[in-house]
Image: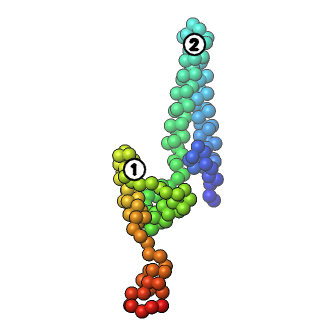
């Protein structure tokens, strides 16, 4: 049986594990808060200061509950790294141009952006795209092997 998975704050979680984590966090943080409050009421003259210190201990309890939950319940996501197909990437760039218009030129980018493109191995993709835009594409009428573009000297 597949567990029920939910998306919470951009991450995938198991519903049961989320509930258990909430219960663990509540038990540890509230337990720490009430225990510290009783302890500090005997040590600190002001009741308000005792509660303030107890709240700090309760916050530390929240962190401890989160750390314990992270140890008990492993992530449900599976990250798979693979190299994207270059033809697919080129197709995405064409679709972006059709939807948004001109994508600009690499020469117009600031050096920091160019460095990021190199780091992500995307610079060559954009350079090839820019080069392909500059080279004239043969039209169907003048392409070799079509009626308007015969190279054998005959007339259509």
In the drawing, does residue 1 fall left or right of residue 85? right
Give whichever of 100, 135 is nearer the camera: 135
**Figure coloring:** rainbow
- Tag 1, which secondary structure? helix
Residue 85 appears in view: no
- 94, above or below 151, in the image: above
Q: Residue at x 44, y 84 (%)?
A: 149
Q: Residues within 10 Å of mark 2 (few under 14, many from 20)?
A: some
Instruction: Give the farthest residue toward the bottom.
Output: 154
Give whichever of 74, 114 is nearer the camera: 114
Q: Residue 17 bears which disc, if any?
A: none
Q: Residue at x 56, y 31 (%)?
A: 62
In the drawing, does residue 27 fall left or right of residue 124? right
Give whichever of 67, 91 is nearer the camera: 91
Instruction: Give the farthest residue toward the top.
Output: 45
Q: Quadrant of the N terminus?
A: bottom right
Tell me where residue 141 appears, x and y as whole percent.
Answer: 48, 80
The tag earlier along the polypeptide, 1 or 2, is 2
Please give the residue where the numbered disc 2 appears in the rendered image.
Answer: 49
Tell me where residue 41 appears, x and y as whole percent.
Answer: 59, 13
Q: Residue at x 58, y 22 (%)?
A: 55
Please give the residue where the numbered disc 1 appears in the rendered image.
Answer: 108
- 113, above or below 93, in the image: above
Tell me where residue 119 appears, x and y as whole percent.
Answer: 36, 51
In the drawing, does residue 85 fall left or right of residue 59? left
Give whichever of 115, 129 is nearer the camera: 129
Q: Residues within 10 Å of mark 1 (few under 14, many from 20)?
A: few
Q: Residue at x 43, y 64 (%)?
A: 133
- Tag 2, which secondary structure? helix
Residue 2, quarter of picture = bottom right
Distance between the alpha carbons at the discs numbered 1 and 2: 59 Å
Residue 104 appears in view: yes
């Amino acid at each position: 049986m597949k567990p029920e998975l939910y998306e919470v704050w951009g991450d995938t979680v198991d519903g049961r594990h989320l509930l258990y984590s909430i219960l663990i966090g509540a038990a540890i943080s509230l337990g720490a808060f009430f225990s510290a409050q009783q302890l500090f009421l005997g040590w600190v003259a002001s009741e308000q200061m005792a509660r303030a210190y107890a709240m700090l201990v309760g916050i530390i309890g929240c962190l401890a509950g989160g750390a314990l939950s992270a140890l008990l319940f492993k992530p449900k996501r599976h990250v798979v790294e693979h190299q994207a197909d270059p033809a697919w990437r080129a197709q995405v760039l064409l679709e972006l141009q059709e939807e948004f218009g001109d994508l600009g030129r690499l020469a117009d980018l600031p050096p920091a952006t160019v460095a990021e493109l190199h780091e992500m191995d995307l610079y060559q993709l954009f350079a090839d795209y820019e080069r392909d835009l500059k080279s004239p594409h043969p039209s169907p009428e003048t392409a070799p092997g079509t009626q308007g573009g015969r190279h054998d000297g005959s007339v259509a």
